[in-house]
Image: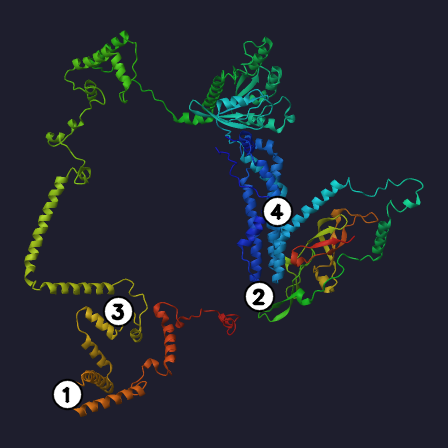
Amino acid sequence: MPQHEHMERHRKLHGRRFDAEERDRKRTARLAHKRSEFAQKVHGLRAKLYNQRRFKEKATMRKTIAQHNERSNKHANDEAVADGAVPAYLLDREGVSRAKVLSNTVKQKRKEKAGKWEVPIPKVKPVADDEMFKVMRTGSKKNKAWKRVVTKCTFVGDNYTRKAPKYERFIRPTGLRMKRANVTHPELKTSFQLDILVVKKNPSSDLYTNLGVLIKGMIIEVNVSDLGLVTTSGKVAWGKMAQVTNNPELDGCVNAVLLV
Amino acid sequence: MPVYNFKNMAPVPSANDLVDIVLTRTQRRTPTVVHPGYKISRIRSFYMRKIKFTQQTISDRLTAMLTSFPRLSDIHPFYSDLCNTLYDRDHYKLALGQINTAKTLVDAVARDMVRMVKYGDSLYRCKCLKRAALGRMCTILKRQKASLSYLEEVRKHMSRLPALDPNTRTLLMCGLPNVGKSSFMNKITRANVDVQPYAFTTKSLFVGHTDYKYLRWQVIDTPGILDHSLEERNTIEMQAITALAHLTCSVLYFMDISEQCGYTIESQCNLFRSIAPLFANKQLVVVINKIDVQPWETLEEEKRRMIEELVKESGPNTTLLTMSNVSEEGVSAVKNTACDKLLAARVDSRVSGNKVESVMNRLQVVFPTARDGIVREACIPESVSKERERMAMQSSNKSKKKKGSRIGYAPTVEDEEEEDDTPSESEDEMMDGEAGNSGRKKTARELMWENGGPGVWAPDYREQYDLADPEWRFDAIPQILDGKNIADYVDPDIEEKLRVLEEEEEQLQAEYEAANMEKMDDDSLDEMEKVAVGEIRDRIKIIRQYKERPGGNNRPVLPREIRGRTKDKHDEDAKLSADAIEKRMEKYGVDASKMVERGRKREREDPRVRRRAERAAAADKEMEDAAANDSDEEMQDGRGLSKGAIKRAKKEREQSVKREKSLARSHSRPREPSQMGLKDESMAKIAKKVESKGQMRWHGGKGEGDHTQSVHLVKWMNTGKKRNGTHYCR
């Protein structure tokens, strides 16, 4: 009656077959060939996925090999620089080159110079009105065409009240209203789901801004009070700008980058 | 009582596998073809279906997972505690909770995305939304990687847990490591537990079964327990503690008095004291093991006293027993004692429990009261009392050998030997029996023994046959007669039946003869005519049957005009061609040539046509004659016909041939009405083809006339407010 570890028990009782080790060795030896055969045969999406996975494996392999080789590799040794006088013929050989640091600082300065409103997505694709709005035909004979339905995602404030249907020109469907955005902090490299406070600017048109239409490249203000960010004067910042980085109407969510 | 079977839990796929399973299923089980030209509602529903289907699949899989894993609060506390020690209750609950959360998250994602798809205005947008939805669902699944792999491990381990029943009769062994628990287990069950000379060979609970008093006993072997506090115990020890704590059983506490296990008797006593609370309400047997190495009698006085004190202080229910696995001394005594104690305890608990009350309430024992003071003794016949006395006498003076009752058994050699051994006795009995009541018939058995015993002589059962005439008893009855089994024809009232049958036959014969007497006169046909009449009658019968065949009404009916054209072999009513008429009439032996001719005459009412036909027939006849004449012209030149007549005939013939040749068709003859207006033969052929296509439906196919247009709503007629009196008369 085998209980619990039946495999081990069986091995204990009957041992392994005589060629077990040989078979294992052969199987591992054959594995590379099998893999290559598959890799050559596979195509389409599976190939893409397979190659991605394989690439990752290989990268880790390379890294581990590099780690193992670190001991034997030759590399710059800063401590080896002798104190005091250095012979002329040794001046340029060792030590840290400062070129890299310099270039970094130059870049940094240039960045600061470039202005406050440099944003991750500099260009915003203009959206035409007929793409943005769908004509809604009204009237008992459906012959009036002055109402518009917004086809993109929108942000509608909490205290928004609709106008009377008779005077309501723009309709923002409830299904396409967004309240929260997935905001990435570029320095912390983490994402948070934050409330949208207001839509700041839509470069295409002021109308879109007023309607609160959310499209790629827009600037929105998000509630960051949960993050505990502090302004330079020491106050807790609770509203911060962020730029929308995706097309919410295609993804079903708003992704944004915090502008810091 | 629920039986705990953790073996039938379905395997839990890893997160990656689960994603693959779900997506493949969606791809395979939902429609795959959609075009931007489709109506937008169709495109939307296509993608909504994909999203909903994926969500459904995921939640089905996860629900199945959640239901298959037992809830620790629902199962027996023993199993629940065992799971706690083995898998950590918190971890287990957390994993299941996370799976549950993932399910609700997936549902929420699907709900949101389906709502978004409802506003999709293009295929591209719908597709993007679907892609996002599936991606988000799969991400949620991938986040469950850790809990899924944990659950799979738990499932594997659980399925290999021994199938022990917490409520049955159980013997449980416990003690320090290496004191001989597993060896004892191997002695009394077939469990085949690994026994090794090092500590903690047994790392988990093992279950074996043994029989005692025709009952099944579950024997549980536990890992060794060390003497330290509960917090310090490791998982292996905790399993033993769990079993001790939750199972109602008989506990065997093993002690190694040889101290070979590496623990002194004192430390073993200490362990006993520290786990003593777990022995409460259990039947305890302290087993002194390995007495082959160190017999109990020669044990140092101090140690022995220590053990005895231990037993004494643990209560009156504790028993001390000695045994050895090697010499197998006392093994069965230990088993029996433990089983007996548990059995007694179980019965006790039954009797003292609440359930007994309900049974006892329904029981009533009645003691009848005597109605008067008269003593009514049993009436024993005189012969019986005599016999009894005799038997008593015999048993008193013999009483040397007790013979077992062999009623209902076949006599054996043993019996015979016994008879031989005690001939005086048996013969005495027999003689007594015969002498006592000489009128008694000898039994067949006695006769058999008189005549040489079984195999030599057997009674003839035929003597006992109860037949009408006792003479028949010894008649030989064959089993098979004339190739038939006699037994098949045995019938107690066969005579009666035969008589009835014979009577009936006679009556029938009489009736038949009476009927024949009347008929004899009008039978004046000869043999040939009779045959012919018979054939005709058969034919009539066939025709009638054909007419009355089922399903006659529900088939296409040919209109009269078409009937003649189609030579349908299944259609009896079709107009027949001359050939067919001739053939058919020939069947009845009638010459149909005149019939055909008459028919033709009636058909061609045009006199010119008729005349031409007659003339052609005459010419044919003449030609034949002429040919006949030509062949023997040289011999019989000018004989039979005058020269002038021959010439005239010849000329006429030549002319007619010429005329025939010049004409494709006679001008006077009207065309067939169906070919009127057609230019030539090929046109006619085409027309015929087209016509036959049109007639297809008479043969069950769909023809051009079968074209139907389904009713469809014409928009301008059915929309707006013009209906229901809203427009014109408001």
Q: In the rendered image, which residue does mark 4 sit on?
A: A33
Residue holding disc 2: B37
Callout 1 and callout 2 share a chain = yes
**Quick check: A225 left or right of A45?**
right
Q: CA distance from mark 3 to mark 2?
A: 57 Å
> Alpha-carbon neighbours of circle 1 within 10 Å: few (<14), some, or many (≥20)?
few
Which residue of the protein is positioned furthest toward the right in this rendering?
A: A85
Residue A198 location (% of width, % of height): 73, 56
- Callout 1: chain: B
* Sooner in the amino-acid sequence: mark 3 or mark 2: 2
State the SS at label 3. loop
Q: Between marks 1 and 2, how big is the CA–CA gap?
A: 98 Å
Mark 4 chain: A
Q: Are marks 3 and 2 on the same chain?
A: yes
Badges 1 and 4, same chain? no
Q: Which mark is residue B572?
A: 3
- For badge 2, the amino acid type reads Gly
Kindly indicate whether the residue at mark 1 contacts the one at mark 3 (C-beta within 8 angstroms).
no
Please give the label number shown on residue A23: none
Q: What residue lies at 23% left-to-right and 80% top-to-bottom? A: B600
Kindly identify the residue that appears in the image at 57 percent across and 20 percent down: B179
Residue A92: where, in percent of width, then height? 89, 47
Closer to the camera in the image, B282 or A107: A107
